[in-house]
Amino acid sequence: MNVARWEKDGAITVMSTPIPTLKPGEMLIKVAASGLCGTDMHICHGETPHASRNVVIGHEFSGHVEAIDAGCVTSVKVGDLVAIDPNMPCNSCTYCRNRKYHLCPNLSCIGVTIHGGMAQYVAVPARAAVPVPSSVSPVVASLAEPLSCVVHAVDLGEIKTGDHVLVIGAGPIGLMTMALASTGGARVTVIEPNEMRRANALSTFGASEAYGPGELVPGDPLRGDGFDVVFECVGRAQTMTDALTFAKAGATVVWVGVAKTDATVTVSPFDVYRRELTIRSTYTNPYGMERAVKILADGKIDWSQLISHKFSLDQFDEAWGVFKDGLGMKVCVTP
């Protein structure tokens, strides 16, 4: 079978490898759709410290169950469509015992530390497979993992009905954040440099206002100007700083974007104290996959609008080029 594998910094290589053989507790997935993510770019350039060299990338994917190890205890059957939760905790550390398994220091991640879904077939632990209703297409089902991360971020934002929410960045994660915030009763404003993405935010994903960078001027947060909740969905030091600037007194700021490991942000402790700001960060997708699948299936948002490009695995180099150049929205590979 063909796979896309990280072997050296700066390159993802397509090569042929044997179809995996099942180990106890595993099932074989015939991959239907696998999305490219900013984390894949970080992995490619050696910017993800815990990533394993020579790993097959792909942590956002769906597929059909091809085979199940005889010893597996699972509700899914051969032929079922499943979305894959890539994060595999140790289940024995203090974080796992206290319902914070995403912070497990021994966390394995499909597509990051063990072979992932940018392949025709992949073997996964049975616990990773989340059933998907037949009403959801395999391509849309591949959005379950990034959407589950957004579910976690929105939970941390603690949005209340009537809140005014700012989302900085209208890439796939930003658009998902807008959709969940707006369907949860918030009024959503977005800042995004790309005109096409601003248009998508307004037409499909629930934003009420859209601005380019520099067009929205912060007011006096101590007099009630600004936003109740701000989500930074870019992953750059400047936009993380901007998120604090737009937060009104008493607001919550959620850093969703993944910054480079050497990025730093200067924060005024007195300013945080005086405005009584809450600054939160998000890491992966604890207990969010089934909720994400339900959201994809409920039909309130046309999630297919996030998928701008589809390529076969034989066209991976072209897919990677579109992704690297930031063209379109979500780039999806259908092996």
Image: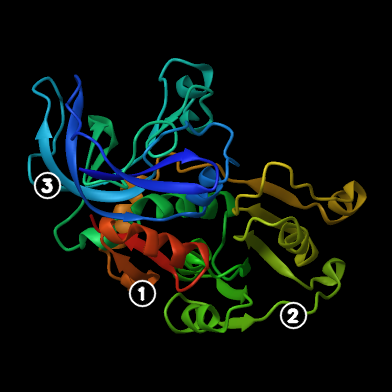
Please indicate whether residue 268 sits to the left or right of residue 31 in the image.
right
Q: Distance between the residues labelled 3 and 1?
A: 24 Å
- Residue at far right of view: 270
Q: In what element is the residue under mark 3?
A: loop
| Residue 313 image-quadrant placement | bottom left
Residue marked by disc 3: 80
Residue marked by disc 2: 216
Say if residue 202 shows up in the picture: yes
Q: What residue type is labelled 1?
A: Gln
Mark 2 and mark 3 lie on one chain; the one further toward the N terminus is 3
Q: Which is nearer the eye, 219 or 33? A: 33
Residue marked by disc 1: 305
Question: Looking at the image, is 64 positioned above or below residue 103?
Answer: below
Q: What residue type is labelled 3?
A: Asp
| Residue 286 image-quadrant placement | top left
Q: Which is nearer the eye, 268 or 236? A: 236
Q: Residue at 56% of width from left, 62% of height from top?
A: 160
Q: Residues within 10 Å of mark 2 (few under 14, many from 20)?
A: few
Q: Residues within 10 Å of mark 3 (few under 14, many from 20)?
A: some
Q: In what element is the residue under mark 2?
A: loop
Across and down, in percent, residue 202 comes to 50, 82
Quadrant in the picture for the C terminus: bottom left
Q: Which is nearer the eye, 141 or 19? A: 19
Q: How far apart are marks 2 and 1 (CA)?
A: 26 Å
Say if residue 176 shows up in the picture: no
Q: Which amino acid does label 2 sit on?
A: Leu
Across and down, in percent, residue 236 comes to 69, 57
Q: Which is nearer the eye, 38 or 197? A: 38
Mark 2, mark 1: which one is toward the viewer?
1
* Tag 3 and tag 1, C-beta contact below 8 Å: no
Q: Residue at 34% of width from left, 53% of height from top?
A: 144
Across and down, in percent, residue 258 comes to 60, 50
